[in-house]
Structures are given as structure tokens and as C-alpha cells.
Image (cartoon, coloured by chain):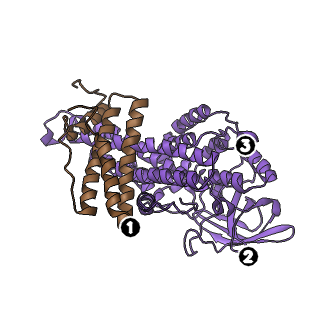
Chain colours: A brown, B purple
Amino acid sequence: MNALTQPTALDQARQLLESTRRVLQKSDDPYVISRFGDWQIRVEVAAALLEYAETHPTPVAATEAQIAAAEALLFASAAEFELTGQRSALPSPLEEPLRWKYQLVGNYHLNGVAPGRTA
Amino acid sequence: MSAHPQHPAHIIRSDAEAIAVATRLAERFAVEASVRDRERRLPVAELDEFSASGLWGITIPKAYGGAEVSYVTVAEVIKLIAAADPSLAQIPQNHLGVVDILLQTGSEEQKLHYFGKVLAGYRFGNAFSEAKSKNAGTFDTQIRVHADHAQINGEKFYCTGALFAHIVPAVGTNEQGKALIAFVERDAPGLTVIDSWDGFGQRTTASGGVTLDGVTVPLSAVIPAHLAFDQPTADGPISQIIQAAIDTGIAVGALEQAKVFARQARPWIDSQQDHGWQDPFTIAAIGDLEWRVHGTEAILAKAGKAVDQALAEPNEDTVANASLIVAQAKVLSAETALLASSKLFELGGTRSVTGKHNLDRFWRNARTHTLHDPVRWKYHLIGNFVLNGDKPARHAWN
């Protein structure tokens, strides 16, 4: 996998939001509208954490941004399916499984164990 | 409560000083926050210390002698205080909003007069909301402007800060239905502040009632507040970012306690560990809370920058953008405050619910304060711009 050419989870979450928006064009359905609002928030928080990890690095800040991006993409694929009835192929599983990223962040913040070390 | 502060306030000169003062105060306020909540002991001495610190004047423009700090700093200050005691953090909420309405709609003389008072340590309360009017944006209270004075009659509720204020700004409408604000001295005849707030959260905000019975003020004490929304101004986003900062602070405070109690928890039998903090599910749950709280803080800071932009260049686009990003902060802070204050018990185990810890105050405060305006409409506000290109309505809740 090439990190430079592979679209990131955040990019894909954004692209799905944009393509779904183009399919729907406009809506006055309050539930559809608020779903897009929720979606936008998931994308923005992942972008903000990525930016923050670059300016305020900690041993787990980048991992926190990766979790946010992965959650944004999971949200995006579910919302796309819900709103259009179609589902894009999800990206191949991340090299490091998402579920272990929570462990990594939690072990740092709860126990002070930086990634790569053992308690 | 007197209409004058006992001591003149310190004047804060910079963003960095504001953060340093808030950090120091938050440490002090945290010590007895639980006791104040449990006994519903109103924070009279703490509030004097809070306003005397100069933090209530940090948004006053430099041209009027204030520090004119960034709203990134304002949000950080409120978050720091709220992490220690969210009732104390909520009390200046309307004060800070009123400072901005004065900036947007007051005359030069009024700005000089009232900004000078704020820098000297005067606290504004509020008599804005009404429990009986049709919705949050309508007022039955009347302000009638006569040749040399104005008269106010009405009944208010959710008047956070009024009990402790030196000046109580009251909203009412004139004959044309336009909203005005009258600055009423705390000891003015006809003004009654009722300590009737008995909510299960934010218990020491004294967010009770105010009655205005033929209260008379000079015309110099009335501002055309409706102008803050007739034209695009940062006032709505300013009001909302303070709300989001309080809820972010509650989330931060709850997460800190979650870690303290998670580390003390016994290991669950099936985990086959020696300590609770080794539990793989506990560790992952803390990881989940951490990214959510940090994400909320990062969006709150972005919201602060958007508010600064709207203040510097007020127009339809900058104000809409500030409303949209502040709404993101509002959603995330409400979600994380409620989540962290509930997860706290799951991770701390049954011992964390014993009365002596009073840890339920985090959830009670989160649940109560996040009701200020319904977050369900913030998803809609954001989605309506993303999908339909519609800008948010301009009012004090956006």
C-alpha cells in the first residue's frame, strides 16, 4: 500500500459525502438534512484532529486522528447506503486493525504507556 | 446583592494572561465544586474572585481598555472553569453575550460607560428568557420608551447570574415589536430576583426568576439589541460558543474522573488481570473517549477562529460560517459531555456511584446544560447548508 497514492479514509468519507449529495441534489426532508449535518460533523472532526496531530504531536495524536477518520468513513458508507440504496466498496482493511487503535490511545491516556512499549 | 462590586477588578492584558488566570482559578474552584453542588451552596465568594480576576472583561475591545482576546481564548477560559465547576462557568455566559451586544448595538457613550464598568468588575446578569412566551425568541415583557425614561414590565425565568449581578440587562419589546435591552441596576425599585432554580443539574447557577414591575431606567440605559440580528453580526455564534465551551469543559472534567476511577477499579474476574486498568475493554473505552474529547476541543478552537473572523469582517458569509462551525462544536460537546459522564460509572464500577464521590454531578450538569437549546436542530442547521446551501437563521441560539 502506498500512503501517498492511497486515498485516506478521510478523503473517502469526504468523497462519499459529496457523491451522495450530488445524487440527492436537494431535500426538504428534515431527517435527510440532519443526516448530512451529522455526516459533515464526522468529517470535520477527523480533519480537525489530523490538523491538531500535525501541530500538537503526542505519542497517540495521529492514532486518534486515524480513529476519527475511520469512524467518519464507517458513518459515510452506512449513510450513503441509507440515502441512496447503493454502497461503494469499502477500502481494504487497514494494515493495523481499527479496534486496536482504541487500545493504543487508551493505554497511553489511562496508563501512560506509549505505543510500541509494553506495560 | 449590591449594585456595585466590593473591590475593583484586575485588568487582564493578553490572551496568555487570561489562560494563566483561568488555569489558576480553575484549580481553586475544583476543590469545593462537589460540596457546593451537593449542598446547593451558591458560589458568592468564588464569583467575587472570578470577576475580580479580570476574566469577565477579556472581550472588551482594546480601544476601550480591554484585552480583546481571541474567541479561541474565551472558549478555552470557559472550558477550563467548566471542567472545575460548570455552574461557575455558566454564570458569565450571558454577561459575555451582553458585552458583545453592547459592542454591536450600543452608542459610543454607552460603550464607554458600560465597558468601563465591566473592566471595574461589574457583573451583568440577565433577564432574557421567559417560561410562558410562545417560544424562546418571543417576549411578553414590554419596554416602553418615553421622552426621558423607559419603563419595563414583565416576568422572566432561567435568569442565570441575575442573583449575583450588579446590573441586570432585561430584554423586552417596544411598541413595534422590536427587542430592546434595558440595563437595570440590581437595586432598582421594581426589580425582584427570585432564587427559584431547583434543577437537578447546574444547581448553583441560581438560574431563577426575575420580575420587572414598573422598573424605570434612563434612556441612556436602553440599547436597540434587535440590530445585532437584523444585520449579520457575530452575536449568535458568540452566545453559542460559550455554551459549547461549558459542555466541552464538563466532558473534560468527566473524562479526568473516569481515568481516576478506572485506575482504582478492581479487575473483572474474567479479565484474568491483577488490576482494573489492565482490562482491555476499559483501555479501549478510554481510548474512545479521549479521541472524542480531543476532537471536540479541536473543533471548539476552530469555532473560536471562525467567531474572530465574523467579528473582524461581519457579513452574511462570515457570520454563517461561524454559526456552522460553532454548531459542530455544540453537537460534539453535548455528545461527549453526556457520553463521558455516563461512561465514567461503567469504567469506575459500582464503587464509583457511592454518594460520597458525588460523581453524578457531571451527568446532571451535562444533561441540564445541554438543554439550553436543542442539539437536534444543530445537525439540521449544518445539513441544511451542506445539502441545500441554506445559511443558518440569525438569532441568539445560532
Quadrant in which the C terminus of chain A appears: top left
User: Few, some or many C-alpha atoms within 10 Å of disc 3 (few <14, some 14-19, many ≥20)?
Assistant: many
Are labels 1 and 3 assigned to the same chain?
Answer: no
Are labels 1 and 2 assigned to the same chain?
Answer: no
Q: In this view, does B369 lie above or below B295?
A: below
In the image, farthest residue toward the top: A117
Report which residue position mark 3 lands on: B119
Q: Which tag is nearer the camera, tag 1 or tag 3?
A: 1
> Residue B116, position in %: x, y?
77, 45
> Residue B250, position in %: x, y?
44, 47
Q: Report if residue B253 is visible in the image.
A: no
- How far apart marks 3 and 2 lie (CA) works out to 34 Å
Q: Which tag is nearer the camera, tag 1 or tag 2?
A: 1
User: Helix, strand, or loop for circle 3?
Assistant: helix
Q: Do the residues labelled 1 and 3 touch (CB within 8 Å)?
A: no
Report which residue position mark 1 lands on: A27
- How far apart marks 1 and 3 lie (CA) works out to 49 Å
Which residue is depicted at the point 34% across and 48% down? A14
Which residue is depicted at the point 63% across and 47% down? B313
Labels 3 and 2: the sequence-earlier one: 3
Tell me the kind of residue under disc 1: Ser
Q: Which tag is nearer the camera, tag 3 or tag 2?
A: 2
Report which residue position mark 2 lands on: B175
Q: Mark 2 lies on which chain?
A: B
> Residue B326, position in %: x, y?
50, 51
Res B153 → quadrant: bottom right
Tell me the kind of residue under disc 2: Glu
- How far apart marks 1 and 2 lie (CA) works out to 39 Å
User: Few, some or many C-alpha atoms within 10 Å of disc 1 (few <14, some 14-19, many ≥20)?
Assistant: few
